[in-house]
Image: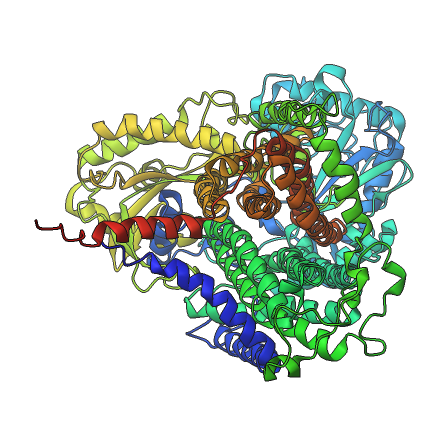
C-alpha cells in the first residue's frame, strides 16, 4: 500500500533550510513586509471592528445586561420571555416596582437607595451601639446626604409619612428605615395608644410605629416632646442632631428588643433590620443600619405616576452626595487607589455606605486605571529582553514584534465574525508579553549558541540561521499550539465574554508565533549585520555581560560574501571569537552545579545509573508535595459568598455579605422578588448573534391553549396561590421565613383582588372583558397580574417576595431553585391543559418560576466552573499529543504530561490553601493554566530527545545546559508581567497575577526539579528518533512493501 501523506515530513524538514536561506538573503524585505502587513491588518481589523453591522461599532463594547448570561439556557430564555411578554402587554416595569400595594421599602427603587452600616471603630468594643453619642454621629453622617443640593428634587416623598421636611419649595418624607429615626422622634406628652396599655400587645400599632414612624408607644423617661423639641429646622431637610437623653435611649432600645421578642414575626423582621444577629440574646446590638431611599415616583389611586422618572437627576444628585461624603470622611484618591478604599470613620464609628447609583461606573474607572499597569509590564519586558540579549536594539525589535501581534490579531478575530471586544481582552496583553518574550529568548539563545558551535554551523549566517530557525520553529510551535488550544478551550464556554477572550488570545498567540519565525529572524540578521556595533543601539548593556552573555560577542559575517558564494560553508570566519565558548552565570550554574548534582551517583564511581540520590530525593519530594496539594485541590468548592471584584479594602467588597450576615434580618428589598408565570410558552430567535447579545433577543410565543375563563382552571389557579403561600423549603437559603419558599404576606394573587372588587367569581365568556375592565382601573398595580395583549388575556402571574436573599451564592440559589422546580413538578400533573402544559421534547413548561437576573446569573456561575473542567479535558489530551509529536518518545511524553498535571493540581491546591473558592476568576484562569504550564517542559523534553549523547545523564545535561537559561529567562519575564497585575485594583487582575505567577513558579519548580531528575533516572537512552524520523522509517517500510518482487530466475 502507498502512503501519500508521509513525504510531507521531508517537505517540512526542507522548509527550514529554504526559509533560513531566504531570511538571510532577503532580511530587509521580510522585516519591512512583516511590519507593513501587521500594521495594515491591524488598521483593517480596527476599521472592521468599528464598522456598524460588520463589527460592534466601537473599539470597546459597552457593558450590557446580557453579556455574561448564557443565552439558550432555560432561566435566561425565561428572562427573555417575561421581558417580551411584559413589553407586549405594555406593562411599565418602573411603575410596577413602585405600586402602592407593596410595603414601603419596596416603593423605593433599589438602585437609588443609600445604605449606611455602622460599626464600632475598634473591633474590640462590644457594648450597646444605641447610645446618645453614637446616634448623634449617625445623625450627622446621614445629614451629609440629606443636606446635599438637590435632595428635595429626588427624595422619597411618601404621602402617608408621619414626619416631613420642607426646603426650597420641596417636601420630603423623613427616612423611616433609619436607625436614627427610631430615636429622633418628637413624642406627644400622652401616648397615642390608650394610656397604660401594654404596647407589645397591639401588633397594628407596633407595625405602624416601626414601619410608618407613627409615635404610638411613648411614655419614656425624658423623651423629647413635640411641644418643646423640633428635630427638623425650617427650610432644611436635615435633622437637628442634638444629644439625646441616655435614659430615654436605653428605654427606647429596650422597647425595640421587647417588640422583636413578642412573637410578632413581622415586628421581629423590622427590628432585625437594624440590629446585629445576637442582639436579642445579648439585649444590645454591636452595629446598626439605616437606609435613605432616593427614589421614586409613587403611583396614585388611578395607577398613573405622580411625576415622570427622573434617573438623570438621581445620577447627578448621587454624584454630588458621593463627593460630599468623601469630603466629610476625608476619603481621597491616590495613585492606583480609589477614594472608596479609604475607611469612612467618625469619632467612634466605622461607617460603610453604598448605593447602586453612587458606585455606577466605578468598575470601568478601576478598569481604566488598571490598564496603566500594561505599560509597566511592557517596560519590564523591554528591560529584561535588553538585559538578556545585552542589546537595546534587540530589545526594542523584540518588543515591536510582541506589539505587532496584538493589533493584527484583531483582523482575523473580526474576520471570524467574533464581534465582541471588551476590557477583559486587556488580559491578553499581559499573557502575550510573557509568551512573546519567551519566544524571543528561544531564538536569540539558539542564535547565540550557534556562534560557538563547530564551523559546520557557525561558519556562515545561513547555517547559523538554519540551526536557530529549526529549533525555534519547532519548539515555539509546540508551546504556541498548546497555549492556543488552551485558550480555544475557553472559547467553547457558553459564557460569551470568556469565549471571545479565548478566541482573541488564541489568535494573538498564533500571530506571535508567525512573527517569531518571520519578523524576528529578519530583525536579528539586521541587528547582526547593521546594528551590532552601532553606537548606543548595538551593545549598550556592557555592565550585564557577567550575568547574561551578550550576542554582541558573536562573530560578524559578511552577508555579501555568502550571496556571492565566496565563503565556504564549512570554513569558519577568522573573527570567530574564543569568547563564544564563555557561558553566562545562569548557564554556569546549570552546567557546573545543577547537572552534576542530578547525575551524581553514590559512590561517585558507581555504575548504577539508577541510584542518583539527589534526583531520587527531588522526584520523591515533589511527588509528595504534588499529592498533598492534590488533596487540597479536591476540596475546592463553588463560592459560598458573593463574588467580589473590588479590593478587600474597597467599600463595595463584602458589602452584600455584611448586609446579610451582620444583621438579624434583611430589609424587604434584600430578598429576591420572584413570580410564577403562566401562559408564556417560548421565545423564538432569528438573526441572533451571541457576540452582540443585546440585539435580536427574539419574539414571544404565547401558549395558544391558555384559557382562564372556566371554573376548573380558575379553581386550579386559586389552589396554586394557596399552595405557594405554604410551599416548604428544605434549603438553608430560605432564611426570611423558616422552611418556607415565600413570605406569605407578600403573595399577590389575581383572584383574591379581582373577586374582592367584583364581589364574586366570573366564569365563561364574560370573564376576560370583566377582568380587562378591572385592570384598566389601575394598570400600574393590576396589569402585572393579568397581561392583556391586543385585548386578549395572554398570561397571568403570582408575585411574591422569596425567602432567598438576593445575590446569594450560586449553590444556595441552585438549592432554592431546585426546591421551586420540585414544587412545580408536583403541582403540574393536577392542572387542566388549558391552564398549563409542558413540551415533552424540550421539557419546558408554560408554568414556571421566575427569579429575574438571580436565576440567570446562577447558570453563568455554574457554567464558568463547568468550563474549567471541560477546558482541562480538552487541553490535557492535546498537550499530550503535542508532546508526543515534539519528542517522538512515549516515555518522555508521559513524564512531561505527569509534570504538567502536577503543576495544574498544585496550583489549584494552593488556591484552596489561601482560602480561594472556585469562582469566576479562578474558573477563567484555570483553563489557560495548562497552556502556560506546558511551555518549559516541552522545551526541555524537546532538547533532551535531540541530544546526541548516548546516556540519559548526558541527554539531561545537554537539555539543561542548552535550554535552562531560556526557561529561566522566560519564567522571569512572564512572572514580571504578572507582577504588575498585583498593583491593579480589580481583584480579577490580582487573582490572575497570582494564578499566572503561581503557574510559572510551579512550572519552573516541577520542570527543573521533577521532570529533569525523572529523566536523569528513568529517561530513554541511546538514539531517540524524532517524529520526522519515525515518519521516514514508516514511509520506507511502506514503500518497500509496494515495490515489486525481483523476478525469479528461470532454469
View extreme (left): residue:
1051
Q: Nearer the viewer, residue 596 or 911?
A: 596
The x, y position of residue 796, in whole percent, is 31, 44
Q: Nearer the viewer, residue 758 or 581?
A: 581
- Quarter occupied by residue 117: top right
Q: Is residue 565 above or below residue 642?
A: below
- Position of 964 with respect to 29 (left or right) is right
Name which residue lies at 57% across and 26% down: 266
Name which residue lies at 41% across and 74% down: 53
Count of number-bearing discs = 0
The x, y position of residue 878, in whole percent, is 44, 45
Q: Is residue 406 above or below residue 652?
A: below
The x, y position of residue 992, in whole percent, is 65, 47
Specify the color scheme: rainbow
Q: Is residue 856 above or below residue 250?
A: below
- Quarter occupied by residue 719: top left
Does residue 108 show up? no
Name which residue lies at 13% across and 50% down: 1048
Q: Nearer the viewer, residue 341 or 680?
A: 341
Amino acid at each position: 500500500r502507498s502512503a501519500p501523506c508521509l513525504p510531507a515530513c521531508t517537505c517540512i524538514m526542507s522548509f527550514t533550510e529554504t526559509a533560513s536561506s531566504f531570511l538571510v538573503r532577503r532580511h530587509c524585505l521580510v522585516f519591512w513586509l512583516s511590519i507593513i502587513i501587521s500594521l495594515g491588518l491591524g488598521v483593517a481589523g480596527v476599521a472592521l471592528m468599528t464598522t456598524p453591522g460588520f463589527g460592534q461599532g466601537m473599539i470597546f463594547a459597552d457593558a450590557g445586561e446580557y453579556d455574561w448570561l448564557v443565552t439558550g439556557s432555560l432561566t435566561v430564555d425565561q428572562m427573555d420571555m417575561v421581558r417580551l411578554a411584559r413589553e407586549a402587554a405594555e406593562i411599565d416595569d418602573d411603575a410596577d416596582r413602585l405600586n402602592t400595594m407593596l410595603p414601603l421599602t419596596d416603593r423605593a427603587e433599589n438602585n437609588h437607595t443609600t445604605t449606611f452600616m455602622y460599626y464600632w471603630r475598634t473591633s474590640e468594643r462590644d457594648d450597646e451601639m444605641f447610645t446618645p453619642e453614637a446616634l448623634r454621629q449617625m445623625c450627622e453622617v446621614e445629614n451629609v446626604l440629606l443636606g446635599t443640593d438637590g435632595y428635595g428634587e429626588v427624595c422619597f416623598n411618601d404621602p402617608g409619612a408621619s414626619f416631613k421636611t420642607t426646603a426650597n419649595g420641596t417636601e420630603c418624607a423623613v427616612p423611616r428605615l433609619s436607625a436614627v429615626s427610631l430615636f429622633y422622634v418628637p413624642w406627644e406628652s400622652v401616648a397615642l395608644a390608650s394610656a397604660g396599655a401594654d404596647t407589645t400587645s397591639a401588633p397594628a400599632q407596633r407595625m405602624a410605629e416601626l414601619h410608618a414612624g407613627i409615635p404610638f408607644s411613648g411614655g419614656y423617661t425624658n423623651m423629647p416632646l413635640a411641644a418643646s423639641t423640633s428635630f427638623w429646622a425650617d427650610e432644611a431637610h436635615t435633622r437637628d442632631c442634638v444629644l439625646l437623653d441616655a435614659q430615654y435611649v436605653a428605654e427606647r432600645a429596650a422597647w425595640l428588643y421587647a417588640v422583636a421578642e413578642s412573637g410578632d414575626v413581622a415586628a421581629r423582621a423590622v427590628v432585625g433590620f437594624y440590629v446585629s444577629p445576637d442582639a436579642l440574646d445579648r439585649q444590645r446590638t454591636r452595629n446598626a443600619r439605616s437606609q435613605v431611599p432616593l427614589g421614586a415616583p409613587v403611583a396614585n389611586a388611578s395607577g398613573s405616576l405622580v411625576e415622570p422618572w427622573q434617573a438623570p437627576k438621581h445620577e447627578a444628585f448621587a454624584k454630588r452626595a458621593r463627593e460630599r461624603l468623601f469630603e466629610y470622611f476625608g476619603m481621597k484618591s491616590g495613585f492606583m487607589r480609589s477614594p472608596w478604599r479609604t475607611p469612612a470613620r467618625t469619632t467612634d464609628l466605622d461607617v460603610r455606605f453604598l448605593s447602586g447609583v453612587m458606585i455606577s461606573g466605578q468598575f470601568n474607572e478601576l478598569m481604566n486605571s488598571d490598564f496603566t499597569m500594561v505599560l509597566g509590564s511592557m517596560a519590564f519586558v523591554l528591560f529584561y529582553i535588553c538585559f538578556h540579549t545585552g542589546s537595546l536594539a534587540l530589545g526594542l525589535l523584540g518588543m515591536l514584534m510582541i506589539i505587532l501581534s496584538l493589533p493584527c490579531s484583531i483582523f482575523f478575530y473580526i474576520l471570524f465574525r467574533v464581534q465582541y471586544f471588551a476590557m477583559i481582552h486587556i488580559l491578553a496583553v499581559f499573557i502575550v508579553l510573557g509568551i512573546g518574550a519567551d519566544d524571543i529568548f528561544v531564538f536569540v539563545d539558539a542564535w547565540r549558541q550557534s556562534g560557538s558551535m563547530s564551523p559546520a554551523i557557525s561558519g556562515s549566517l545561513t547555517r547559523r540561521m538554519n540551526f536557530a530557525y529549526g529549533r525555534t520553529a519547532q519548539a515555539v510551535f509546540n508551546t504556541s499550539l498548546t497555549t492556543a488550544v488552551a485558550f480555544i478551550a475557553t472559547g467553547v464556554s457558553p459564557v460569551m465574554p470568556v469565549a471571545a477572550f479565548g478566541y482573541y488570545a488564541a489568535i494573538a498567540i498564533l500571530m506571535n508565533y508567525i512573527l517569531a519565525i518571520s519578523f524576528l529572524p529578519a530583525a536579528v540578521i539586521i541587528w547582526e549585520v547593521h546594528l551590532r556595533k552601532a553606537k548606543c543601539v548595538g551593545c549598550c548593556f556592557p555592565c550585564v555581560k557577567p550575568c547574561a552573555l551578550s550576542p554582541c560577542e558573536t562573530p560578524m559575517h559578511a552577508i555579501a560574501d555568502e550571496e556571492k558564494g565566496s565563503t565556504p560553508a564549512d570554513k569558519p570566519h577568522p573573527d570567530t571569537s574564543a569568547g563564544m565558548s564563555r557561558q553566562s552565570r545562569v548557564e554556569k550554574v546549570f552546567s557546573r552545579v545543577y547537572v552534576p548534582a542530578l547525575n551524581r551517583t553514590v559512590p561517585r564511581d558507581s555504575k548504577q545509573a539508577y541510584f542518583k540520590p539527589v534526583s531520587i530525593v527531588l522526584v520523591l519530594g515533589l511527588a509528595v508535595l504534588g499529592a498533598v496539594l492534590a488533596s487540597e485541590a479536591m476540596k475546592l468548592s463553588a463560592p459560598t459568598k458573593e463574588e467580589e471584584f473590588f479590593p478587600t479594602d474597597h467599600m463595595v467588597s463584602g458589602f452584600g455579605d455584611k448586609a446579610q450576615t451582620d444583621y438579624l434580618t434583611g430589609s424587604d428589598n434584600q430578598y429576591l422578588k420572584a413570580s410564577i408565570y403562566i401562559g408564556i410558552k417560548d421565545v423564538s430567535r432569528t438573526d441572533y448573534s451571541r457576540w452582540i447579545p443585546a440585539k435580536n433577543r427574539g419574539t414571544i410565543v404565547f401558549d395558544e391553549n391558555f384559557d382562564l375563563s372556566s371554573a376548573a382552571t380558575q379553581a386550579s389557579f386559586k389552589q396554586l396561590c394557596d399552595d405557594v403561600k405554604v410551599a416548604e423549603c428544605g434549603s438553608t437559603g430560605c432564611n426570611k421565613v423558616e422552611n418556607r419558599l415565600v413570605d406569605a404576606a407578600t403573595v399577590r394573587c389575581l383572584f383574591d383582588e379581582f373577586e374582592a372588587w367584583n364581589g364574586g367569581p366570573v366564569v365563561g365568556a364574560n370573564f376576560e372583558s370583566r377582568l380587562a375592565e378591572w385592570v384598566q382601573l389601575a394598570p400600574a398595580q393590576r396589569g402585572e397580574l393579568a397581561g392583556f395583549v391586543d385585548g386578549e388575556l395572554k398570561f397571568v402571574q403570582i408575585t411574591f417576595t422569596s425567602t432567598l436573599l438576593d445575590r446569594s451564592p450560586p449553590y444556595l440559589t441552585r438549592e432554592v431553585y431546585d426546591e421551586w422546580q420540585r414544587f412545580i413538578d408536583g403541582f403540574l400533573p393536577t392542572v387542566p391543559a388549558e391552564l398549563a402544559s409542558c413540551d415533552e421534547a424540550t421539557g419546558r413548561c408554560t408554568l414556571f418560576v421566575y427569579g429575574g437576573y438571580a436565576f440567570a446569573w446562577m447558570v453563568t456561575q455554574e457554567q464558568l466552573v463547568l468550563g474549567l473542567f471541560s477546558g482541562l479535558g480538552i487541553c490535557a489530551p492535546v498537550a499530550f499529543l503535542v508532546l508526543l509529536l515534539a519528542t517522538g518518545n512515549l516515555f518522555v511524553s508521559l513524564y512531561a504530561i505527569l509534570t504538567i498535571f502536577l503543576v495544574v493540581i498544585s496550583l489549584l491546591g494552593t488556591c484552596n490553601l489561601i482560602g480561594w473558592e472556585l469562582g469566576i476568576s479562578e474558573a477563567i484562569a484555570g483553563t489557560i493554566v495548562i497552556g502556560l504550564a506546558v511551555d518549559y517542559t516541552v522545551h526541555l523534553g524537546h532538547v533532551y530527545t535531540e541530544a546526541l549523547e548516548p546516556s540519559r545523564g548526558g541527554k539531561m545535561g545537554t537539555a539543561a545546559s542548552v535550554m535552562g537559561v531560556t526557561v529561566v529567562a522566560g519564567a522571569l519575564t512572564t512572572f514580571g508581567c504578572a507582577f504588575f497585575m498585583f498593583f491593579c485594583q480589580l481583584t480579577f487582575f490580582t487573582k490572575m497575577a497570582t494564578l499566572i505567577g503561581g503557574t510559572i513558579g510551579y512550572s519552573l519548580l516541577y520542570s527543573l526539579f521533577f521532570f529533569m531528575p525523572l529523566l536523569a533516572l528513568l529517561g530513554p537512552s541511546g538514539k531517540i528518533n524524532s517524529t520526522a524520523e519515525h515518519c521516514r522509517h514508516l514511509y520506507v517500510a511502506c514503500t518497500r512493501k509496494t515495490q515489486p518482487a525481483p523476478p525469479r530466475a528461470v532454469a
